[in-house]
Image (cartoon, rainbow, N blue to C red):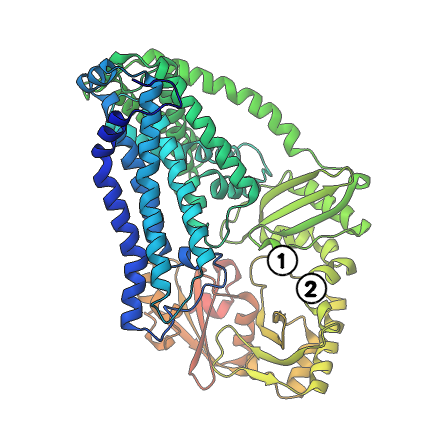
Amino acid sequence: MKSGILSLNKGLFQQQARSVSWIGIFFALALIIVLPLSILIRHLTISNSYYGGPNTFAFNAVFDFSFPFQLMAYASFPVLLAIILVNFTTKKAATDFMHSLPFTRQTILTNTYVVGAAALLMPIVLTGGLLSLLRFVITDKFYSFPEIAEWMGISFLIVLLIFIFTIMIGMFVGSGLLHAGLTYLMIVVPASLVVLVLVNLQYYVNGLALNQYTDKLLTNGIFLVRMAELNNRPFTGLEYMIYTLLAAVFVAVSYFAYTKRPSEATEQSIVFPLFRYVFLYGLTLFVMLIGGFYFSEIQQGDFLWTIIGYLLGAFIGYTILQMILQKTLRLSWPWKGFIVYGVIITLLIIPVNFVAGFYENAVPEPDEVESVALNEQFSEPKDRKTLNDETAINQVIDIHNELIHHKRSDIYNSVNIFIKYNLKDGSSISREYEVDTAYLEEISLDLRSNEAVKQTYDPISQLNSLTDLTFATIYDNSSARPARISDLGELDELIQALEKDSKNLPSQYLLLNAPREFLGDITFSRAKGEDIFISLTKDYEHTISWLKENGYSSSLMLTENIDSATIVKVAGNESKMGEIEPIVYEGRDPSLLPEPKIETVDSDEISELLNISQPNYYGEYIVVFSMDGNTNYQFYGFDLADAPAFITESLQ
C-alpha cells in the first residue's frame, strides 16, 4: 500500500481509468473529427483550394481551423471527466466504499488528478500526431509543425485548468447535477457579479466610467469568453503565469477541502455551512442585480421600477436557491434570512451614496492635468484623440463641470462620451456620460472652435500633410452615381476650400450622431493609408460653391438635385409601421407609402424640409426625397414641433 500526496497506487489508478476510459475515447474522436478528419475531407474534395482564406489575425492556423468546435470540446469534456471521477463523493454507498479502501484521501485525490490529466493529454497527443502525419499528405500545408506543438501545449493547459477547477468545485457539493451547474456558474459569476454591481451603480453614480471597467472584466475575467478570443488575441506571458498560479491554488484548495469534507456530506447540496451562505446570498445578489438591470434598461423603467426589479430578483433567486439547498419543492421559506439579507443590502447603500458624491464631483485642477481625451465612448482605442493644449484642457474641465449636473432627457438624440484625464503624477481619471446631443453641441461650442481641437480631431487638418491621395469621391448616403475627382490640381483646390470652411466652423467630430442638414460625404482615397471621410453640411459654403462651379455637386443632398419629396405622418399611424419600414429602409418607390401622404416638387418647400429633417431619423413625420430621375430615394425624418405649415395643414 502506498500513501501520501505524491504517491500513486496501480490498482486504484486502473480502477479510476476504467471508469473514464470512454470519456477519453470520445474526446479523442471529437478532436480527430474536428481537425485531422475535417482537414483530410477538405483536401480530398477541394485539394487545390484554400479552405476559405487565412485569418490574418489568427496566431495559430491549427486553432483557426474549426475553432468554435474545438472550444465546445474544451469546455465540455474536462467538466464531464471531472464529474465522473469524483462522482463517488455524491453517493453515500460509493463514498463509504471508497473511504474504506486502504488509501488516504490524499492518495485518492492524487490518483484522480493523474487519471484525469492522462485522459485529457492522450487525445491531444494523438490528434497532434495525426496532424503531423497529415501534413505530409495534403497539398495545402497551411499549418506548420511548430504550430502543432503550440496547439498541443495550449490545448492541454486549457482543458487541464478547467478539469482542476471542476474537481475543486466537486469538493464543496453533494450533488452530481449541482456539480455541473455550479462549475459553469463559478466560471461566469464572479466577474459577471462585479460587472452587474458596476452596471447597477451607474444608476446612482453619475459619470461612472462603466465601460472602462466592464469590457476588461468580461473579456479577461470570464475564462470561457477569454477562450473565445484566443485565436485573435493569444495568451500573454502574464496570463500564463496567472493561470498556472490559479491551477496550483485550485489543487491546494481541493486537497484541503477533501480532507475536511465529512463522509455524510452526500446529504447536503453544499457541503460546508460557510459556503452554503456564500452560495445562497452571493447568487441571490446576482439575480437581484439582474432584476434591477432588467427593469432599468430593458424596460426603460424609472427608479421605482428599478427597486421593484431588485425585490423581485432577490425573492426569486432566494426562493430557488433555498429549494436547491433544501432539496425540495415544498419549501419551508426561511423569511428571517431574507429579512437579514435585505437589511444588509440596505445598509450597504448608505456608504455607496456617500462615496458617490466624492466620485461625481472629483474634477481635477487644470495644473494637475498633463493631457485629456474627450471622445465618443464606443470609438476604437486607436481612434481616441488626446489634447495637451492648456486652453483645451480648461475647456474640457468646464464641460465636465456642466455634465456633473446634466441628466439625459432625449434617449433618441443623445451621445455617449468618454473623458480621460492623464495627470502629471502618472495617474488618470476617467468618466463616462450620456448627453443630449443638442446640449453637448451648446456647451462644447468653445472647445470645438479651438484651433488645437480642430488640428487634433478634424480629418481636414490631415489632408495637406498627406502625399498619397489618389482621388476623392462625393456622394450622399446611398447615391447611385457618386462624383469622382482624380485631378491633383482640383484635389488641392478642394482641400483649400475645405480648410477655409474649417477655420470658420466649430469641429463636428466630437459628436456621435450625423449632423443636421447633412448634404453628403467626401471620401479621400489613399494609396496606402486609411481613407479620410468628411461629412458636409450647408455651412461648408466655400466647399459647396467649389463643387457646384466644377460640376461635382450632382450627388449631394441639395435642393436642386432633388426631384420630389413624399411626406407621411407617422404619429397617430403607428399601426402602419409595418408598411412604412420596408419602403424607407429598402429605398423603394415612395409612391408605395400608405395614405395619407403628400408629395411636393416645389423647390422652396423641399429646401425647408431639408433644413428641418435629419437623415435616417424615425420622427413623427417621415420624408422620402427622390433623386436621380426618381431612381434614388433618401429617408429622412422630423418631429411635429418642426413641421412647416404646408405639412400640418395637409396632414391633420
Tell me where residue 372 appears, x and y as whole percent: 72, 47
Marker disc for residue 458: 2
Task: Select label 1 or label 2 by which is in front.
Answer: 1
| Occupied quadrant, residue 166 | top left
Residue 118 in picture, x, y percent from top left: 33, 38
Q: Amino acid at mark 1?
A: Asp
Instruction: From the top left corner, tell me how far across and down residue 169 is, in percent.
Output: 35, 26
Badge 1 marks a residue whose secondary structure is helix
Q: Nearer the viewer, residue 496 or 287?
A: 287
Image quarter in which the C terminus is found: bottom left
**Mark 2, secondary structure of its residue:** loop
CA distance for labels 1 and 2: 12 Å
The residue sitting at 28% across, 25% down in the picture is: 320
Local packing at callout 2 (Cα closer than 10 Å; few below 14, some 14-19, many 20+) is many
Determine if residue 330 is in view.
yes
> Based on the displayed image, in which of its 4 quarters is residue 107 positioned?
top left
Circle 1 residues within 10 Å: few <14, some 14–19, many ≥20: few
Q: Nearer the viewer, residue 420 or 394?
A: 420
Q: Nearer the viewer, residue 95 or 553?
A: 95
